[in-house]
Amino acid sequence: MIEVKIIGVRIEMPSNQPLVLLRELLGERHIPIWIGAAEATAIALAEQGVVPPRPLTHDLLCGVVLALGHTIVRVNLTKVEEGVFYAELVFDNGTTIGSRASDAIAIAQRAQCPIWAAETLVDEAGVIIGGHDEDGNERAVADDEAKEREVRQFREFLNDVEPEDFEK
């Protein structure tokens, strides 16, 4: 398993389809996952630290888990089949529950637990975005020009990629 972090929620153009972008914690590959609008909103709200006046479904689930005396200790992205990502929630007592990847990511944010991806999933769905030095280490993006170049490369990638590209 490879630990990943959430980079953010983006809108893929021209289809206006939301996606969540993950990145290897100790690597250079990114994992774009196309998601629904509701899940994109839930992830973006948590990413921005917005707490709704009434709990959303993901907030409710986390509250129920805590009220029952348990915690969600990690989220595993287990596989991708025909462009569909699968995940599981892992509880403190070892119980695992299957989940859609988008829901699991939204729950991980609220539970403040790590997200891990199966190595085969990262190998299949991972893409490299941006430049790296001769040793394979990501270059520090310090100036505006480098940041703009990285954004432009990512946009170009998104313009050319389709969900079917992640199928075997």
Image: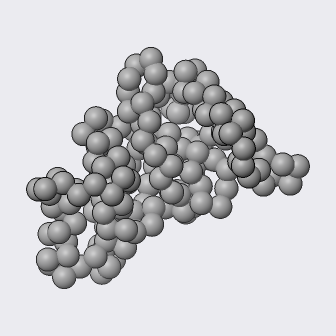
Query: In this picture, is 126 found above or below 1?
Result: above
Residue 104 showing in the rendered view: no
Q: Residue at x 55, y 21 (%)?
A: 159
Position of residue 108 measured from the top left corner of the image (x, y, whole percent):
36, 61
Q: Judge by depth and name the residue closer to the eye, 116 or 130.
A: 130
Position of residue 143 measured from the top left corner of the image (x, y, whole percent):
72, 44
Q: Residue furthest right?
A: 134
Position of residue 35 measured from the top left corner of the image (x, y, whole percent):
35, 37
Q: Residue at x 38, y 33 (%)?
A: 18
Q: Residue furthest left?
A: 54
Q: Is residue 146 left or right of residue 115?
A: right
Look at the image and tell me in which quarter the N terminus lies. bottom right
Q: Is residue 139 left or right of residue 116?
A: right
Q: Is residue 6 left or right of residue 160?
A: left
Q: Judge by depth and name the residue closer to the eye, 137 or 96.
A: 137
Q: Is residue 33 left or right of residue 89?
A: right
Position of residue 17 measured from the top left corner of the image (x, y, whole percent):
38, 27
Instruction: Classify residue 168 by image quadrant.
Output: top right
Q: Residue at x 19, y 82 (%)?
A: 69
Q: Residue at x 30, y 49 (%)?
A: 45
Query: In this picture, is 110 found above or below 136?
Result: below
Query: In this picture, is 133 found above or below 2?
Result: above
Residue 4 showing in the rendered view: yes
Q: Residue furthest front?
A: 144
Q: Judge by depth and name the residue closer to the eye, 148 or 86.
A: 148
